[in-house]
Image: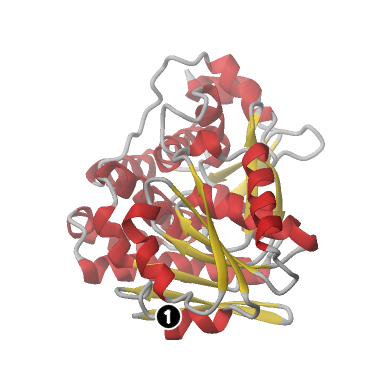
Amino acid sequence: MESLHVDLAGRSYPIWIGPGLLGDAARWRALIRGRHVLVVSNTTVAPLHLDRLAKGLDGLRWSTFLLDDGETHKTFANVGRVLEALGKLGATRDACVIALGGGVVGDLAGFAAACWMRGIDFIQMPTTLLSMVDSSVGGKTGVNLPVGKNLVGAFHQPRGVLADIDLLHTLPQREYRAGMAEIVKGAAIGDPEFFAWLETNADALAAREQAPLIEAIARKCRYKAGVVSRDETEQGERALLNLGHTFGHAIETAGNYSELLHGEAVSVGMVLAARLSERLGMSAADDTARLIALLGRLGLPTETSGQHPASRLLELMRLDKKNSAGIQRLILWRGIGKAEIVSNIPDDDVLGVLQ
């Protein structure tokens, strides 16, 4: 098992990575400070894993709220329903929300926890690879709007993150591959040695071999934990974690959050960011080729479907929350491991890679 920490001013929380953690109530029960617990999950995950979690809640007053599965359900309406469930439970200020699910569940449950009584505890128990290596770490919570992804939310750090890799045994192959995109992203942003390690171990990771999988999750979480510790509210360095996201979010929004999984959209977005970097003379074609090759070996898409006009995608990119004062800002790179924030990019260049 790997044990990491996110260290923030005046507070810290653990990230545990390994097998059998959901049933290790002696470990995570200590994170719960009060007697009220609301478990937020979804209709796919709960039948598979809720019973094991429930055994650790003995003696507490707890209930569940189940979402339907999918990105389309990360809405204000469902946040309201979670808050209603907390009210029915009689949740006090020392109550805790447990997010048992993927990124949608974690984002929505965390946002509801941030809102209830102006902020109560929550624990992330991610059940997808993507949420283990990305959304469960760092305290970003929120919901989608029809005009854009994650435009409403709050920074609200969890009490702890429990990444039980046994839960990945039930994860569909497509979802598993989508999680790999976020692991590649972390290496592409700031760790060329990790990128080379991924190239060496791509086949083992695609086959879900336990030892390299734990190492990959830990290396990605360690990198993100360091960034979050230095820049919790994304005033600078943390923005680099969004490599590929502005492109990816536009693709997701254009498809009504139903055509591509988030990780798949990020995979395509990273390639578009690399192609734009190359077009602007910032990086070499060899770096783009290595990225495309690695994503391909991990079973991820590297091209847009072509069904959404480039002009529409550019319009959606302008609404991305990473823009400032209407200026188009993108995370680009100067080769593997060298990401940076770039502003004032000509529309013609962005359209050129989108087309």
Q: Nearer the viewer, residue 114 or 56?
A: 56
The x, y position of residue 155, in whole percent, is: 70, 58
Residue 157 rendering spot, x and y as whole percentages? 65, 66
The residue lying at 63 percent from left, 61 percent from top is: 139
Q: Nearer the viewer, residue 347 or 41?
A: 41
Looking at the image, which residue is at 68% across and 28% down?
318
Position in image of residue 107 (x %, y %):
58, 51
Q: Nearer the viewer, residue 76 or 3?
A: 76
How many numbered callouts?
1
Picture residue at 56% right of the left edge, 76% below the top? 60
**Residue 50 appears in which quarter of the rendering?**
bottom left
Q: Is residue 148 left or right of residue 176?
A: right
Foreground residue, 52 or 250? 52
**Given the image, on which type of amino acid does mark 1 rest?**
Ala
135 shown above or below 161: above
Q: Examine the rendering and report whether any part of residue 208 can be seen.
A: yes
The N terminus is located in which quarter?
bottom left
Q: Which residue is pictured at 32% across the width and 56% down the height?
A: 48
Q: Residues within 10 Å of mark 1 (few under 14, many from 20)?
A: some
User: Element at badge 1?
Assistant: helix
Would residue 351 be found to the left or right of residue 328 on screen? left
- From what the image shows, is residue 343 above or below residue 350? below
Classify 107 as above or below 161. Answer: above
Q: Is residue 235 visible?
A: no
- Estimate the x, y position of residue 205 in percent, counting from the top left: 23, 58
What colour scheme does the image use? secondary structure
Q: Which residue is mark 1?
A: 25
